[in-house]
Image: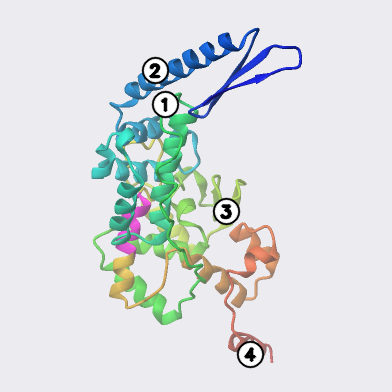
Amino acid sequence: MGSLRKHKNGKWRAEVRKQHRYISKIFDSKGDGSKWIRETEIKIEKESFEDFRDSAHLSLANLITRYRDEITPTKKGARSEVYKLNFLIRQPIARTKVLRLSSRMLIEFKNELRRTRAPATVNKYIHYIYTVWETARLNWGIILPPNNPTALVKREKVMTKIERILSDQEYQDLLDACKQSNLEQLSDIVEFAYLTAMRFGEITKLQVKDIDFVKSLATLHDTKNGESREVPLVQRALYICDKYKFKEKILQFQTSQVLFPIHRDKFRHYFEQACKKAEIKNFRFHDLRACSITNLFKAGWDISSVAVVSGHKSWSELQKYTRIKAIDLVEKINKKK
């Protein structure tokens, strides 16, 4: 939309606001200003048409693929993101041309995801589409409508989960179910997590060179807080590492000998199957970390010692992982008598 304003010096300021652009220019006469406004508006419309026409052939899959190949490799956790982006690329909605992509399509896609994915995972996939769109528009110079089609897609409500602690019997039942799984590494990874309090990402990034079999230590280089740490390993954990140190690499993009090479989503599938078989409800793999930390406190470890293992910086962070009950303290007191 164009407008004209006369200055006190008799000159005219012509202004054009159109398609999120603002341009102004000073003229000696009102007629020249009006002519410039008409010509400028036509030029903007023509340029926009040509730009959108250049984007018309692009599909959502084209944008996601470029993001996966150019942006994802620079991120921490790239392997997991590549897996998720590849999932998006395989979906029918990815074949949609970006200029035809609508909020309605994305809402339908979100509803489809809800059938098989947790709320947090659904939100993650929608956020990927949002990020890819904004990256293409703002960083790659691809002309797209400024209104991101994910803006009207209501995110799923995610309930904050409280870590669940397994009883000794539940843990044994889970381990037995894992041993019956078709996934060879399942029981060993579960047991290793229970013994070390390591996160899934930390376990699956462990390499043979990170294990000191003489000192019984594992060195974690890529942790959540960005700092490396050493974790003491009990004999059983060392045995599991020794068992896998000569296994063949099974992921094509690995360049070093990773002890437990497996994708998170594939592992989650088999882990959930094992939980169901063991009749253990509302339990996540990450809860094994809480089990391990709680076991250390039960064994009499102090806060600073547990923090060395878990990597927590403060008691407030560590506290949420502990589920020590009054009965545990009674048993501890009685042992001292």
- Front-most of 103 and 132? 103
Q: Which mark is residue 330?
A: 4
Observer-side mark, 4 or 3, equals: 4
- Front-most of 89 and 33? 33
Instruction: Give residue 136's position: percent from left, percent from top.
Output: 43, 30
Look at the picture and state if 150 lies above or below 278.
above
Give the class, few, some or many, for how many residues have Cα within 10 Å of label 2's Cα (few <14, many ≥20).
Answer: few
Residue depicted at x 45% and y 63%: 157
What is the C-alpha distance between the residues marked 2 and 1? Answer: 13 Å
Give the class, few, some or many, for how many residues have Cα within 10 Å of label 1's Cα (few <14, many ≥20).
Answer: some
- Mark 4 touches mark 2? (CB < 8 Å): no
Give, as a three-letter code, the residue at label 4: Val
Q: Secondary structure at mark 3?
A: loop
Instruction: Give residue 311's position: percent from left, percent from top.
Output: 61, 57
- Mark 4 touches mark 3? (CB < 8 Å): no
Q: Secondary structure at mark 1?
A: loop
When asked about the image quadrant of residue 154, the answer is: bottom left
For the magenta stretch, what is the residue range? 262-271
Give, as a three-letter code, the residue at label 3: Lys
- Mark 3 touches mark 1? (CB < 8 Å): no
What is the C-alpha distance between the residues marked 4 and 2? Answer: 80 Å
Q: Of label 4 and label 3, which has the lower sequence position?
A: 3
Q: Which residue is mark 2?
A: 46
Give the class, few, some or many, for how many residues have Cα within 10 Å of label 4's Cα (few <14, many ≥20).
Answer: few
Quadrant that contains the C terminus: bottom right
What is the C-alpha distance between the residues marked 3 and 1? Answer: 58 Å
Q: Of label 2 and label 3, which has the lower sequence position?
A: 2
Give, as a three-letter code, the residue at label 1: Ile
Q: Is residue 220 magenta?
A: no
Q: Secondary structure at mark 4?
A: helix
